[in-house]
Amino acid sequence: MADTKSGDINTGNKSFSEFIKGFWKENPVLVMLLGMCPTLAVTTSAINGLTMGLAVVFVMTGSSVIVSLVRNIVPKQVRIATFVVIIATFVTMVDLFLKAFLLDLSKALGPFIPLIVVNCIILGRAEAFASRNSVWLSLVDALGVSFGFTVTLVFLGGIREILGMRTFFGMSVLGEGFEPWVIMLLPPGAFITLGFMLGAKNLIDRKMKERKKY
Amino acid sequence: MSTRVKMILILTLFASISGGVLSIVYLFSSPLIEANLLEELKKSIFLVVPNAKDYDEKVIDEITYFECRDESGSTVGIALPARGNGYQGVIKLMVGLTPDLSRITGIKVLEQIETPGLGGRIGEDSFQNQFKGVQTEPAVEYVKNREPEKDTEIQAITGATISSRSIVSIINKNIQMLKDAL
Amino acid sequence: MKLFSFQGGVHPAYRKELSGQREIKEAGIPEQLVIPLSQHIGAPCEPGVAAGDRIKEGQVIGKTVSFVSAPVHSPVSGKVKKIEKSFHPLGQKVLSVIIQPDDEGARDYMKPLGKNASELDPKDILTRITDAGIVGMGGATFPAHVKFSPPKDKPIDTLIINGCECEPYLTADHRLMVEMPEYIISGAKMIGKVLDVKEIVIAVESNKPDAVEKLEKAGDERDILCVLTKTKYPQGAEKMLIKAVLNREVPSGGLPMDVGVVVSNVGTALAVCESVRDGKPLIERVVTVTGNGVKNPGNFFVKIGTPVKHLIEQAGGTAGNIGKCIMGGPMMGIAQASLDVPVIKGTSGILIMQEADYMQEGYLPCIKCSFCVQVCPVNLLPSKLSVIAEARRWDLADSYGVNDCIECGCCDYVCPGKRPIVQFIKTAKIKVREIKEREKK
Amino acid sequence: MEVILIFISAVLVNNFVLSYFLGICPFIGVSDRIESAVSMGFAVTFVLTLSAAITWLINRYILIALNVPFLEYVSYIIVIASLVQFVEMFIRKTSKTLYDALGIYLPLITTNCAILGLALFGALRDYSFIENIVFGIGAGIGFTLALVVMAGIREELDLADVPESLKGAAITLIIAGLLALAFMGFAGLISA
Amino acid sequence: MANEQNSLILSTSPHIKSDESVRKIMLSVNITLVPAAAFSVYQFGLYTLLLYAVSIATCLVSEYVVVRLRKRTFTLNDGSALVTGILLVMVLPPRFPAYGVVLGAFVSIVIGKQIFGGLGNNIFNPALIGRAFLAATYPVHISQWILPRMSAAAVSGATPLAGMKFDGIVTPFSDLFFGTVSGSIGETSAILLILGSLYLLMKKYIKWRIPASIFVTVIVLGEIFHLINPAKFPGPVFHLFAGGLMIGALYMAADMVTSPITKKGCVIYGCAIGLLVIIIRLFGGLAEGVMYAILFMNAFVPLINRATKPRIFGTGVNHEY
Amino acid sequence: MGITILFVSLASMGGVGLILAVILAVADKKLAVKEDPRVEKALEMLPGANCGACGFAGCGAFASAIAAGKVSVDGCKPGGIDVARKLTELLGLDEAVSVSPTVARVFCSGGIKETVMDKVYNGIRTCISANLIGGEKACLYSCIGFGDCCEVCSFDAIHMDENGLPVVDLNKCTGCGECVKACPRNIIGLTGYDEVVHVYCRSFDKGPVAKKACKVGCIACKLCEKDDETGAVKVIDNLAVVDHEVNKAPVGSIRRCPTKVIRVSKPVSGYEDEFKEKIQLEAFEEKKAGTSK
């Protein structure tokens, strides 16, 4: 995946490029199609997206670091089991934290906070990256990917919130004249919006590639 | 050390570390969480039973309800948690009743996943407030496209007959169950 | 009378009135004849003459080299001009003998065997059929003697003489049946004798009652049964005809003989009769020249090797701006690239269409109307096949039975999106074969 | 009756994929061919049913009995992960054909949110043991249904002129949205 | 090098084509919809005419724009967008806001049809996608009914199905048949829809097995439930003529592009739609389920087609004779 | 209370972990299945285009075959020599691999401008379909020009030019041979990188016929044979053929050819040196001057 052959971000600073690639080139949602479940489920508003994103940032950095630390002592047969235990521990922490301090958000995100455990992004990065790289690189990678994830979630949540409720982060953005599209808050709206986001990304990529060619 | 022994050790170790860490976190957070939950419960109870200042949790025939008292300690009403299926999924309510269960003093929708903007409007105050003072005998009813006439009637949300009907039937069912139990 | 029929099929405008009532005329001898050495399915012949040789009418000019092949005879007396690769109606270039006719009229026919089938030895008849270079004249051009010698484990009980002529426009077989019923009946009996069948059935479409009348009059009720089939295309397709008349289904990938049947065209029966009775090899056939691109459509006795151009002149010359020249009928015929191609043994008609007739301008995506599914006589899903071929998913084509397609063109005809379904299927067939061959390696 | 409602709800009204967004990753990944969709569906249904039973037992006899509810996620996931791994090893050893048909999908199932989601929802709703198993089967069938239908549509669209940028995951998501729209007709079936 | 004047045209057989065309089919569908559409304008007022105009215009413009953007051959004149535009309005409530219709028409064409690759490739019926999208987008507007001009007296504006479901009111058969009831713009008059579709059936532009099997299933199941509990469940005739069953079965379920191509498949598809209609109408939360039943079954069409591939001639039979 | 929970958690999770770990350990022992780890590694080395040029269903199947030693390491055409070397290393083979890289070349020069179009084709615009009835051009051996070859190329290495002829981008071409398979008239062939002199015509028609159909076809005049000092060029069956075993450029033939169908192709980047060795630069320069006119 991480082929640097095309080398379009060649800053010479490897950790920076590891960080930045999670936003576009290896965006976990739009390119790797990982973590779809929370992406679709919680993005009824931008704030939900942001919270979920930050929760993932925490879990991911935490578990990446730990996984990277213990990567050499875990035998391969129990690798996945061990990794998920580590991840689940962090998730439970987040969950308890939200319940203790941010009850409303915790309720809004419902069972999707625990489902971070099985968010393929985290396990995927743990397997593919953290279990093979140093702690520092794993940390940077985790931060990059999880921030990419967060940005995507906020974006998707923003679109759905604006069209579905006329607001963005609770602030009214579309006037009273616009009748909210309820569908945006429902599952079909989530699927369709994300589908078109993916399409738009592919389109932009293709246009950029074409421009490069000529 | 053979891989298999190592395997067993590692997994056991990680699992218990995880258990340990979490229990510590839990010990710190659980008072906060419990306080939160209690606060919420109180809020909903006091909302549906006006004048209530305190309550006792009671269980009868596996039905939990809250008997509410005012400052003087006399019973001013009963708060009954109710649940049932709505249009899309489970609806959870808190229903406030007069001590003799004859009238509703208020309701509060605690959880619901009805269609936003349609059935979801059962969560709006304008809908919930209708229930204040509604008689429960013989049963709560809903009417459509016109103003309620009788004391037992509330007006359904336009276009969301099912959700309105669900609320009404959940209330009726749970009150009936409580009545039978008492 | 019961009309025999099958599932599916279409009924396009038949346009048989253009040439149906015209008696068969002699087309005469053209200035030059081009006789391809491969006019049949199977191994091409080797030239039996050299450039400059003088030859007689009926003389062998192409010799067979294997069993599945048929010799080629000179249709005229004259001189061999040259032997070179030349355009064949099927599109490729094949080795052909080019003959400059003279007016000496020298003949070299075989010895007549006799008139009456019952008095003849089946072996003699079969040898004669082999020597006369007779092939299936309905268009398939499969060497007749091969068809008439089925393996021992495949007994034949029924011979069907195919007089359906379901292709629109064509009337050659119709005229033959009306004008020469005795020959056809006697030819049918000869073939029946060779195959030792229990029953001979002549199947004619219900739009040719005059032909049936003549045939019935000529034939002997006890020996030969005339049946009427429903007028619809492709009633004359071998498999459909067997299904309609006998309700037997030729297995997928199999031949009529797998169900104990041999089907022969009326033209073939005529040719067999002529070769046995008169010793005349297959050097001439009836061709319908029709379509609105010619002034006087009609039916002609044509020497094999006559260029299309000559026939158009015989039919009164071209009318309007010619768009297409089709060898065969409009449903299964082959569009020709030039008017110089010769008539071969399998040519039943030449259809000249004006440019205006030919309307096709691109095609639409499949709208799944299922018209094609309803008309497909072999129960395929042509629409699906066409879409598969369009998307180049050759791997799927096989599982949708592309090789069972008989290319009758019904699907293509009814398609409201004007999709070239048959071409898609033909392409897919080629690709599937290619891939299979590659896998075998 | 309750059991039937749970089943219908899990299959149609609150389909795991189309209204809870559970198991989207394999839904997108494995829905390109009908054969693999069917295999995947069976594998998921099997694991769902099995884990519905096991997680119910854990919930009842460890989490509630020992009063350690905060260990819910960790204990569920460790069991699920091990279970899937065990099943994979078992199938691989016992049946080559089954492994070829299902085995390759099994590792994917560990990270299938549907499994953990089922355990969590089941615990949340206080289902009885039987109800929980029915819920598991229903969820599995619902998942299979959505997956197979999607595979059928995608095979069809393979032959269609879909806009280049929408090919693959994008069009799959949009179709999922349209399917979710179609499934909305079943809303209210459980309220009767 | 320039073509010579007398070059011949080459193409594979067959060289003749029937005079059916996609355009002809689509236009026939449009024309046969006209009586019911005209009746709807009379019944619900000129406002519906505006909706028709807006819907058709949006459909045509969206189709034009998308096709241009995709640089594909221009298919506007095949008339399929027109069909979508008309049908979309026919299944909406009479006072649906015009901006909603614009959105619905746009969604029908773009999401319902063009993203699948345009004409012939869509999996779902575009008009129904538009309708379902609008139902989810504007849930309030989609359930607001008005009384038609020739109302048969009922007081409330509820549709016969909603009246039956929620209030137990049975609308007389003749009102249903002639369409003097409340309901979606174009669905009320069963007689006009049947008359229109007769021509299409005659021309075989409708796969007759689909509406036939829908009707049979609805009648049989309706009768069974009616027998079980006549008070709660209305009779089969009511089911047949109430709500959108007629327009759904004749014009939407039988839509060529989104229905099975095999004969057996059509029957299975029709029966399943009938079954779902009855289930949703009798047990679901909605009063009317035709639209969802059709959309749901549209998704199954590829599977149905695959499962009902006809037996190819000469395969799978005993060849002994 | 706190301590109890801590102990209970430690014990319960530890217990669960222990039980599961034991089960997995036992399963690992009892249910172990051996698999060649090299398959996965080999797969990683392959280009992953699943082009099928190796004759297997895809890269995965090829990787299995490689690991099983069933197929030679140079089986992957697109991967070329690099992949072959890596695979050799992986398998621990000693043998030195020498893969001669190949590229596709189009052996027809008759585009729209040069070839006579004497018929109108009406049907599917693909070569394979058009070939069913002969296409539009008079020459039956010519490029049909509908671009089937471009369509099948996974590497974006072949495109149609304005003259309706496909042009191979030699730097992108991997020699997988998909275009060769796609061309119904066999005018695309795989040739070595370093084989630079070719006859760009595949017509077996006799001189006059070929001449009538196309301005730039081989007319079998045999002048190339006459002027060939190397003995590499022969006219067989009305078509000139260059024998690449004769490792010298037939400069005389290139100069003499009246229709210029014997030509020198451009060198592939990275192979310029070998190219220079094979052919005297002089001939190449002359050719360049010729085309720029």
Image (cartoon, coloured by chain):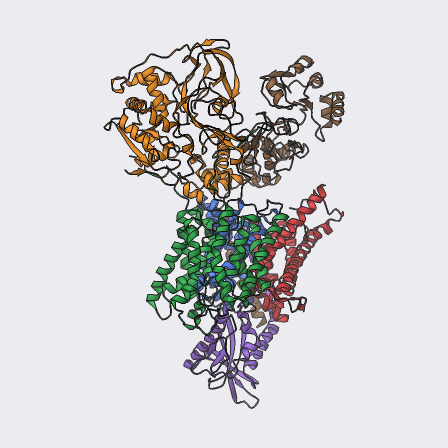
Q: Which chain is green?
A: E
Horizontal side of C132 relative to C420 (left or right) equals left
Q: Which chain is blue?
A: D
The picture's colour for chain A is: red
The picture's colour for chain B is: purple
The picture's colour for chain F is: brown
Quadrant containing the C terminus of chain B is bottom left
Image position of E117 with respect to E54: above or below: above
Residue lying at the far bottom of the rendered structure:
B72
B1 and A183: which is toward the camera = A183
C273 and A38: which is toward the camera = C273
E105 and D45: which is toward the camera = E105
Image position of E108 with respect to F118: above or below: below
Quarter of the image where one finds residue F2 = bottom right
Q: Which chain is orange?
A: C
B144 and C420: which is toward the camera = C420
